[in-house]
Image: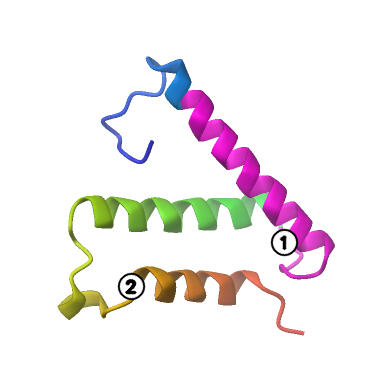
């Protein structure tokens, strides 16, 4: 699902899994906006930022690029904290 090698146009199950996962993300972001947790910006922008961040982290992990000497000992939780800091309301 995270690799460009995986052709989602040829494998409908892979496409369906990706779309289902993205739908869950959209739902969570919409609920977070309704309850005041997330900033009132376009849900599509929040989704794009979230999806890109997780995709990038997944690809780096798959390719063994999350080296402690480069990114510290907890790169994934730290990167997700930074993402959430930008998405969450500050008031």
Mark 1 residue element: loop
Residue 19 percent coordinates (x, y): 56, 32
Mark 1 or 2 closer to N-term? Answer: 1
Residue 90 percent coordinates (x, y): 71, 83
Q: Which residues are magenta?
A: 15-41
Residue at (83%, 65%) from the top-left corner? 35
> What residue is disc 1 on?
41
Q: Is residue 28 left or right of residue 4?
A: right
Image height of 31 relative to 90, above or below: above
Q: Quadrant of the N terminus?
A: top left
Residue at (30%, 38%) from the top-left corner? 3
> What residue is disc 2 on?
75
Please tell me whether the stretch drawn in magenta is mainly helix, strand or loop: helix
Q: Nearer the viewer, mark 1 or mark 2?
A: 2
Q: Residues within 10 Å of mark 2 (few under 14, many from 20)?
A: some
Label tally: 2
Who is closer to the viewer here, 76 or 88? 76
């Amino acid at each position: 699902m995270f690799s460009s090698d995986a052709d989602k146009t040829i494998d409908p199950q892979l496409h369906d899994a990706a779309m289902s996962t993205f739908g869950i993300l959209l739902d969570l972001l919409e609920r977070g906006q309704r309850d005041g947790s997330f900033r009132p910006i376009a849900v599509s922008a929040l989704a794009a930022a979230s999806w890109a961040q997780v995709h990038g982290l997944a690809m780096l992990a798959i390719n063994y690029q999350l080296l402690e000497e480069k990114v510290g000992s907890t790169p994934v939780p730290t990167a997700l904290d930074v993402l959430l800091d930008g998405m969450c309301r500050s008031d």
